[in-house]
Image (cartoon, rainbow, N blue to C red):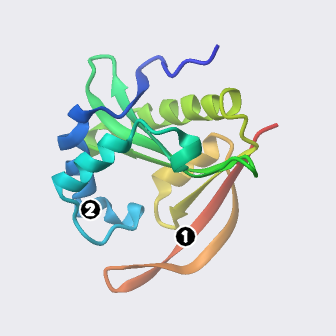
Amino acid sequence: MITLKGTHIYLRALEPEDLEFIHEIENNQDIWEISNTITPYSKFLIKQYLEQAHKDIFEVKQLRLVICNYNNVALGMIDLFDFDFKNRRAGVGILIKDFEQRQKGFGKEALQLLINYCKSHLDLHQLYCNISENNNSSLKLFTNKGFDIIGLKKDWNYVNGTYKNEYLLQFIFN
């Protein structure tokens, strides 16, 4: 049986109490580049999103989970998006909210838990992610978990007046 509990963290579904946490993340301009966000989100819109978060991944094509430590502190989020049941694939995104909590293995553990879940529960054939060419931490995280860089999208994202390249990575289950 698969579990969403790891050694140092666990993954859980979104709760109404996550409103402030998600509002802080979605409105942090320092991370808008990785989420392709260009406008702030109101608490009203996030509350509406949370009210719909219980819907099935097969219906909404997305699954967002909160990464928590065993003191029940929310550290970040990990997402499956563009869930495609017919072709058995989905995109993956991950974020550890606070800079001082990064590089401690939480993202690595969360990604492994999600990979296990995708194989055991969703019967996916592949996962993919998009990572900015200069995001060395994320590139290291995903390649160390078995994702292969399969392409470079030139001038893909326009950020602060300049175009940035973005890698496409893919993980195929055996």
Residue underneath mark 1: 166
Q: Residue 39 falls in which quadrant of the image?
A: bottom left
Relative to 160, 59 lies left or right? right
Q: Residue at 46% x, 39% y: name it.
A: 55
Q: Is residue 62 above or below residue 110?
A: below
Task: State the image coordinates of residue 142 (x, y, percent, origin top left).
Answer: 58, 47
Above or below 130: residue 109: above
Q: Dot 1: within a 10 Å radius of its alpha carbon, few (fewer than 14), some, or many (20 or more) residues?
A: some
Q: Are marks 1 and 2 in contact (CB under 8 Å)?
A: no
Look at 54% across and 36% down and name the residue there: 111
Disc 1 from disc 2: Cα separation: 17 Å
User: Looking at the image, is mark 1 or mark 2 earlier in the sequence?
Assistant: 2
At mark 2, the secondary structure is helix
Q: Kindly identify the residue that appears in the image at 35 percent across and 34 percent down.
A: 14
Q: Is residue 155 above or below residue 24?
A: below
**For mark 2, what is the residue?**
30
Element class at badge 1: strand
Q: Nearer the viewer, residue 147 or 27?
A: 27
Q: Amino acid at mark 1?
A: Glu
